[in-house]
Each structure stands twice: as C-alpha cells, then as structure tokens.
C-alpha cells in the first residue's frame, strides 16, 4: 500500500463571506496547515453554502477569490493539499440530493444554526438554509473523510453528518466512514470583544467586536484596547470573567503560553497593559498572513491555476464515491 493511501483523510470548509475573523483563524484555519504532513487534506471554499443567505453576486465572486487567497496565505499549500472552490465540483450537490433522502425533517429542524439564521433572515427562510447541513454532510462524506477540523459551533452539524452516514449505511450496507470532529483545545470559541458571552462573528454590527485577520496592527491594538473586561484588576482565568477569559484564550492561542504563565506575566499589572500585549501578539502573529495575502491576491493567474487543479483532483476523488453510491441505491449504470 502506498503511503498516501494509508494516510487518513481530512476535510474542512469555510464560507466566503467577507474576510475571515480571528475566530475563524484560531478556531479553524490555522489548525489546517500543520495537518498537511500527517493527513491527506482537502479544503474547500464553500460558495454554495454562502448563497443560503442573500449575496450580491459580484461581491460573492470577489469574496470567494479572496477567501481562496487567504487560505493559501494561512499556510495551505496547494501542492500538498487539495484546495478548491465547492461549486467547481458538482459531485457535492449530487451527493447532497441522495443524502437528503436519508435525512429527517425533524433532525434538520433542530439545528441551532438554522434557528438562528432563520430568525436573522426572516424574510428569506429558503429551503437551502434548511438543508444546508445535508450539503455539509455531502462535502465530508464524498471524500470519506475521517476527521473534520471545525470550531465548536459546527459540532452539531458534524453529528448530523454522522447520523446521515449511519442511516445510509444501515439502508444500503456499510459504505461511508463516520467522520470525527477535530476541535482545538484552546480557541475553539473566540468570543466578541464587546460582548464576551457571544461568539466573535463577522456579522457583528459593532466594528470593535471583531478582529479581521487582514486588519492592520494599529486597528488590532485599538480594538483590543476597547475590549470589554470587568471591574476587577486581576489577569486570571475564572468563571464570571468572560472578557478576561477570552483575552487569555486568544493570547494563549497566539503565544503558546499557558493560563498560569499568563497570570504570572501580568501579576501586579493593569488590564491596560494586558490588552496592549494581546493586541501586539495578535498583530505580530497575523503579519505574515497579511503580507502573503497581499502578494497572492495580485496574482490571479496563479490562484486560478491552483483552484482549477484542486477542483480536478477533488472531482476525481468524489466521482468514484458517487458512482458507488448510485449503484448502491439502485440507479441504472449510465455507461
Ligand atoms: P464560518 O465563518 O461560519 O464559515 O466558520 C468557519 C470556521 O470557523 C468553522 O470551523 C467555525 O467553527 C469556525 N469559527 C467561526 N467563528 C468562530 C469563533 N468565534 N471561534 C472559533 N471558531 C470559529
Ligand atoms: N458549515 C461550515 C461553517 O459555517 C462550513 C462548512 C461547509 C464545512 N461544509 C463543511 C465545515 C464541511 C467542515 C466540513 O463553518
């Protein structure tokens, strides 16, 4: 058996909805690069998921290219991984239909993200928003992925993907691998800087709540300086100190320091010093990503070369799965 076949497969996706946040970065993307040596990695910009909420077409196109460039800037090497744009591989949508016939209406109705998004976009509660997790299951199962690196908010969708796979296997015989979530220990949930009980999100109306990974150093430090904390003056991780806990988690994620080390470092110092230190550490950590992105986004031909090759590879891997699935469910061979 060749080495590549023996490697486990990883799949993850990210939506091209504006530039990524520090939450996307720490909770998801930055963990993807280091996995490339050990695993067979497949990463996708999921533009088909993005249209479940209204998008301006020209903006979506731009966001998708930027997201792809950002993925490479964050350390995804298109030579070692398969990196592509979801709509370039039609097998995802085809498999999604088959899987939707092994998904229950009731289980989709229970999805927290559906409830939240249908309240937020109450004028457009479309069927795609409802079946979103089935397409996500298809993304993963099409590659028979073993592991799926995600932030904590996607855990419910992954459990659903496992249930769908299990149900298909029960109906048609063992076929799909049940994927496992891969959630980072620190930073799986980066919280808003303005309301640390809510997750950091790009759609937050308060511009100070969210760090974008392309923000410049001054902006990053300014946002951290304004971060909401508490009325004590002790940098330590404790229940009830949501703001400080969040800043400590972020600082720990970018410096590798433990909570005890951070507490010792800032003993006797005020929150002001701590906030500036977090801002500087984050800005320095993101500097190579910013520089890499600026170069890549200028080179559209290179990007195209990479995502075209990625889509071709992705198509090949998944066509086999789909043919087998079609046989299993009883469709007549096309050729
Ligand atoms: P999305 O922006 O919703 O497409 O999310 C892309 C990835 O980033 C998913 O794996 C999410 O779980 C992760 N993610 C998004 N927001 C956060 C956050 N505030 N903290 C940690 N991970 C996050
Ligand atoms: N739903 C994920 C999110 O919003 C994005 C996504 C789509 C995904 N397909 C996926 C993540 C497959 C992991 C695996 O973050």
Image: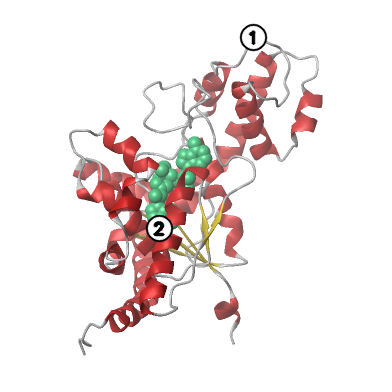
Q: Residue furthest left?
A: 123
Q: Are marks 2 and 1 in contact (CB under 8 Å)?
A: no
Report the front residue among 308 and 316. 316
Closer to the chain start, of discs 2 and 1, is 2
Secondary structure beneath dot 2 equals strand
Left or right: residue 3 versus residue 60 is right
| Residue depicted at x 51% and y 57% | 76
Secondary structure beneath dot 1 equals loop
What's the distance in space between the residues labelled 2 and 1, CA to CA? Answer: 43 Å
Q: Quadrant of residue 161?
A: bottom left
Count residues near mark 1 (Cα–Cα under 10 Å), then give few for <14, some for 14-19, many for 20+. few
Q: Position of residue 205 (x, y in %)?
A: 36, 23
- The disc at residue 44 is 2
Count residues near mark 2 (Cα–Cα under 10 Å), then give few for <14, some for 14-19, many for 20+. many
Q: Quadrant of residue 264?
A: top right
Q: Which residue is mark 1?
A: 231
Q: Is residue 64 above or below residue 179?
A: above
Left or right: residue 254 versus residue 80 is right
């Amino acid at each position: 058996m060749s080495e590549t076949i023996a490697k486990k497969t990883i799949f993850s996706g990210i939506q091209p909805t504006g530039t990524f946040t520090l939450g996307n970065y720490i909770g998801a993307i930055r963990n993807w690069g280091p996995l490339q040596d050990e695993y067979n990695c497949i990463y996708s910009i999921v533009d088909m998921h993005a249209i479940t909420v209204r998008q301006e077409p020209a903006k979506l196109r731009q966001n998708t290219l930027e997201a792809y460039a950002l993925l490479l800037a964050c350390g995804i090497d298109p030579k070692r991984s398969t990196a592509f744009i979801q709509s370039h591989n039609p097998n995802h949508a085809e498999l999604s239909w088959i899987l939707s016939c092994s998904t229950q209406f009731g289980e989709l109705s229970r999805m927290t993200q559906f409830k939240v998004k249908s309240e937020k976009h109450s004028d457009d509660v479309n069927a795609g928003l409802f079946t979103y997790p089935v397409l996500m299951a298809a993304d993963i199962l099409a590659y028979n992925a073993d592991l799926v690196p995600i932030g904590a908010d996607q855990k419910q969708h992954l459990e659903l993907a496992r249930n769908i796979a299990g149900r298909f296997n029960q109906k048609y015989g063992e076929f799909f691998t049940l994927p496992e979530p891969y959630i980072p220990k620190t930073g799986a949930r980066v919280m808003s800087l303005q309301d640390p009980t809510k997750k950091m999100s790009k759609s937050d109306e308060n511009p100070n709540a969210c760090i974008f990974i392309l923000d410049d150093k001054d902006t990053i430090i300014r946002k951290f300086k304004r971060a909401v904390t508490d009325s004590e003056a002790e940098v330590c991780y404790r229940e009830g100190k949501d703001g400080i806990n969040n800043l400590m988690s972020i600082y720990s994620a970018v410096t590798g320091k433990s909570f005890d080390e951070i507490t010792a470092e800032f003993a006797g110092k005020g929150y002001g010093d701590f906030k500036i230190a977090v801002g500087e550490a984050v800005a320095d950590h993101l500097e190579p990503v910013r520089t890499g992105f600026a170069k890549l986004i200028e080179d559209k031909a290179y990007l195209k070369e990479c995502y075209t090759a990625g889509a071709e590879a992705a198509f090949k891997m998944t066509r086999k799965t789909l043919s087998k699935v079609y046989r299993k469910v009883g469709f007549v061979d096309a050729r």
